[in-house]
Amino acid sequence: MDEILNDIRRRHRRRARKWKANAEHRQIKDPAAALTAKCSHPDETIELSLNLNLDPRKPGQALRGSLSLPHGTGKTSTAIVFTNDTALQEAALKAGALHAGGDSLVEQVLQGEVSVDSFDRALASSDMMPLLSKKVARLLGPRGLMPNAKVGTLVPADELLEALDTQLTGKELQFRTEKEGIVHVPVGMGSFGTKKLLENIGQVMKTIFESKPESFGKGKKKGASGKGTKYMLRASLSSTQGPGMRLDLRTVDPTSAFFLSSVETIKGDEEEKEVQAVA
């Protein structure tokens, strides 16, 4: 984690040096703008990638769910809300929903008047599910936008506004396995610092392991029949503009004594055991 954040700081310093070196050019090009212009540094997203020993094509291995991060993702989302309750529609719009409606909103999505690319989340009250499944499931499903109770976007009407707030503010993180059994999850922003990022990663990994299917495996065999069958094959961490860095699996395994510890801690423990063995 420290190496990821140090890499981000190095990019900031390089950008600042380049900005300073180009000051004269900016002054000539637009003197007025140059007086107020400042060097900006993007707040890079930190992403955790996990290669799990899962084959989503097999029954019970298509891992999908949501969790609440201790410090959120640092990103806000856009959402639409499906409900026939006019009072809830008005409240949802005031709370920040892009669109809110019932049958009419379903038709707008179906006709393309509300583009499926214009929002990140689609929430619905439970009573809307039969209509959504019948008319827009083929549009929303492939994009991961179909309201689903597992990820907190299909809820009873009296919980809809609370769920909307959770989705809009980035408190709720959704995850799902890709076809190769890989899960990509944003765990925060570079500005969070090491402590908050590790706490978010810890919550992600605990949830991933709690959701572990009884049977798993990418091979031809049905599932985990042997004691040594691994659930997690590889893990890496990356920032938006930086390279991915391979992680020691023991540092992200909630069942390990080295969970969320540093590689140096592991090496030190192994060296101590070697010394004791020799003695």
Image (cartoon, rainbow, N blue to C red):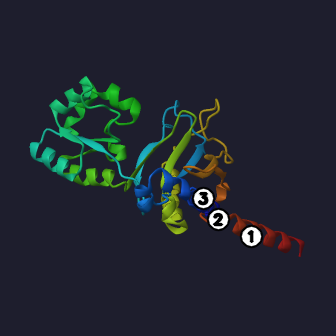
Of label 3 and label 1, which has the lower sequence position? 3
Residue 14 sits above or below residue 116 on the image: below
Q: Quadrant of residue 20?
A: bottom right
Please name the amino acid that badge 3 sits on: Ala
To which quarter of the image does residue 249 belong? bottom right
Instruction: Kindly identify which residue carries mark 2.
Output: 258
Q: CA distance from mark 3 to mark 2?
A: 45 Å
Q: Is 250 on the left-hand or right-hand side of 25?
A: right
Q: Could you tell me the amino acid type at mark 1? A: Asp
Q: CA distance from mark 3 to mark 1?
A: 47 Å
Give yes or no for contact between labels 3 and 2 (Cβ–Cβ under 8 Å): no
Rounded to the nearest whole Å, what is the CA distance between mark 1 and mark 2?
10 Å
As drawn, the label of residue 21 is: 3
Q: Of the residues tagged 3 and 1, which is closer to the observer?
A: 3
| Residue 8 screen position, x and y as percent | 58, 59
Say few, some or many: other residues with alpha carbon within 10 Å of mark 2 (under 14 / 14 to 19 / 20 or more): some
44 with respect to 258 (left or right): left
